[in-house]
Image (cartoon, rainbow, N blue to C red):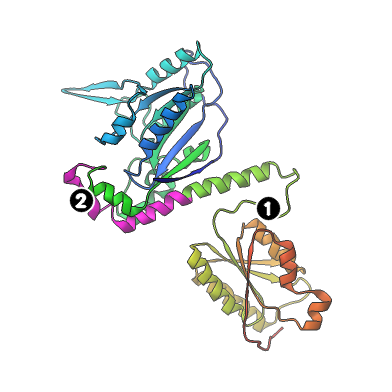
Amino acid sequence: MSDNSNTASAGTAPLNYASNSLYPARRRGKHKIFIGMAPGVGKTYRMLEEGHALKQEGIDVVVGLLETHGRKETAEKAEGLEIIARKQYPRGELTLTDMDTDAILKRCLATSRFASTPQLVLIDELAHTNVPDSPREKRYEDVEVILAAGIDVYSTMNVQHLESLNDLVARITGVVVRERVPDKILDDADEIVVVDVTPETLQERLLEGKIYAPQKIQQSLDNFFQRRNLIALRELALREVADNVEGNAIALRARFANASTPNGQFCNIHERVLVCVSTYPNSVQLLRRGARIANYMNAPLYTLFVADSERFLTKEESLHIHTCEKLCKEFEGTFLRVTNSNVANAIAQVAEKYRITQIVIGESQRSRWQMLLKGSLTQKLVRLLKNIDLHIIASEKMVSPK
């Protein structure tokens, strides 16, 4: 099993979680989320594995809620860890059970009075909806209460439960997910770990009966666990963590904007393609090439035209730029138009603002003497840009309206 660990932004403000004075305000606990593309990737197993390792280091680890779903390996991995008993909710002849948040708080906070060791609670299925008459509707709300009490939490969830992805997941899988977690929960997490396996491995686990009961296997393969669904969900999981990492890096950079940092060095996790068009006819060719590059990289496409503040465009030139803008929108890109007499500086500024990773330009239309005297755009960009790939596209020399 392979995994990819990334750190997201940390929430530090304590929550007004309860009026009960039994649990005085402390520093906010740290939250680590294990996220995967689907059931069965090994999120709970990995969480339990790390719990055992931390217990060996002397940390007080308890299991607040564990869902094994009948998986033998998961149940065996929980052995040796203290498990807080679930709270019972009688419903006529039935008795429903759910996580007992008060019992978790009493257990951890009582222990903390006699020892200075950190407390960690392992909580499965963050998106779970609590049973009726519970103090809170959702399990992630219980997690917030525990964090506010100064207790660290490890939790698990699948990417399809993220609120902002609900409509997209429904289009991909045909399944409308009812249990959802607000994006802010992930944004505020101190660490997010992607527990990742290939779609083929996940399907093998399903066929071996390691995820669902035998009677549900074929139905799962025909529906949610189709290979194309798993590929799409896997990409969503990886991209979601990348977004958190990039967003956190940008926030830190803004926070320390006045600090001494290397010029042009900023965090870009996702690829972003910028095509620089001009009044030259080969701009349409550049735009098509840039769109292909963006498509290969599954990256957003931006198109930039830098207008010279010292001259007006002719009617023919204006129509040409309009054609470029229309073509950019056909490629589902974003067309940008800025006014600046220094083209290279304008491109560099836009690249930093939109966190561009790939820039597409045409070969210089200047003569050798012009380049010797004033330098080419390529040379200027190479000096200005850091950690950005520059694609110089050759084209036939054509008579320019410029």
Q: Quadrant of residue 125?
A: top left
The amino acid on which the numbered mark 1 sits, given as a three-letter code, is: Gln
| Residue 17 belongs to magenta span | no
Where does residue 140 sit, x and y in percent of width and height? 41, 33
Going by the numbered disc 2, the residue's amino acid type is: Gln
Residue displayed at 67% across by 45% down: 254
Segment tinted magenta in the rendering:
211-239
Quick one: quadrant of the N terminus?
top left
In this view of the protein, can residue 316 be seen by the observer? yes
92 displayed left or right of 185? left
The answer to whether residue 142 is visible is no
Q: Is residue 134 left or right of residue 402?
A: left
Task: Find residue 17 and report its horizontal and vertical position in percent.
Answer: 48, 24
Q: Earlier in the sequence, mark 1 or mark 2?
A: 2
Disc 2 residue crowd, few under 14, some 14–19, many 20+, Cα 10 Å? few
**Furthest residue toward right:** 373
Q: In the displayed orientation, state which residue is furthest to the top.
A: 114
Residue on which disc 1 sits: 265
Disc 1 is placed on an element classified as loop
Identify the mark at residue 219; answer none if there is no mark.
2
